Amino acid sequence: MPDFLLELGTEEIPAGYLGRALKALCERVAKDLAELNLPAAEVRGAVTPRRIALFAAGLPAEQPD
């Protein structure tokens, strides 16, 4: 099963927003993938003040017809 990695470079993000930004991104990507019939087995992320990374594991190899 394929995996997907997304890394975003940003301007400096205040520390108080990092956790909420990462949670919102993970939830949104998981929801959008499921709506496209590409549900991920796991979506997780990591964050620094200048980077947000998201990893979606266990994606289907293709969308169903």
Image (tube, rainbow, N blue to C red):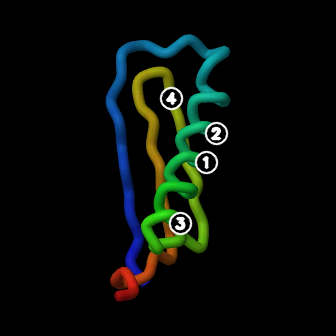
Residue depth check, mark 1 versus mark 4: number of the one nearer the observer: 1
As drawn, 20 above or below 23: above
Q: Is the Cβ of the residue at disc 2 closer than 8 Å to that at disc 3?
A: no
Q: Earlier in the sequence, mark 1 or mark 4?
A: 1
Looking at the rendered structure, the kind of residue marked 1 is Glu
Question: Where residue 50 sits in the image (x, y, percent)?
Answer: 41, 23
Quarter holding residue 8: top left
* Mark 2 to mark 4 CA distance (whole Å): 13 Å
Where residue 48 is drawn, which disc sits there? 4
Label 2 or label 3, whichever lies nearer to me, is 3
Q: Are marks 1 and 2 in contact (CB under 8 Å)?
A: yes
Task: Tell me what residue is drawn at x 50 percent, y 63 percent.
Answer: 35
Return the x and y of residue 5 as percentages of the image width and height. Answer: 38, 57
Q: CA distance from mark 2 to mark 3?
A: 17 Å
> Residue at left 59%, top 73%?
41
Q: Are marks 3 and 1 in contact (CB under 8 Å)?
A: no
Q: Earlier in the sequence, mark 2 or mark 3?
A: 2
Is label 1 in contact with label 4 (beta carbons under 8 Å)?
no
Could you tell whether 8 is left or right of 20 in the image?
Answer: left
How far across and how far down the image is residue 47, in percent? 53, 35
Tell me the kind of residue under disc 2: Lys
Identify which residue, 37 or 43, lies in the foreground.
Answer: 37
Q: Is residue 2 left or right of residue 27?
A: left
Which quadrant would residue 60 be assigned to in this image? Answer: bottom left
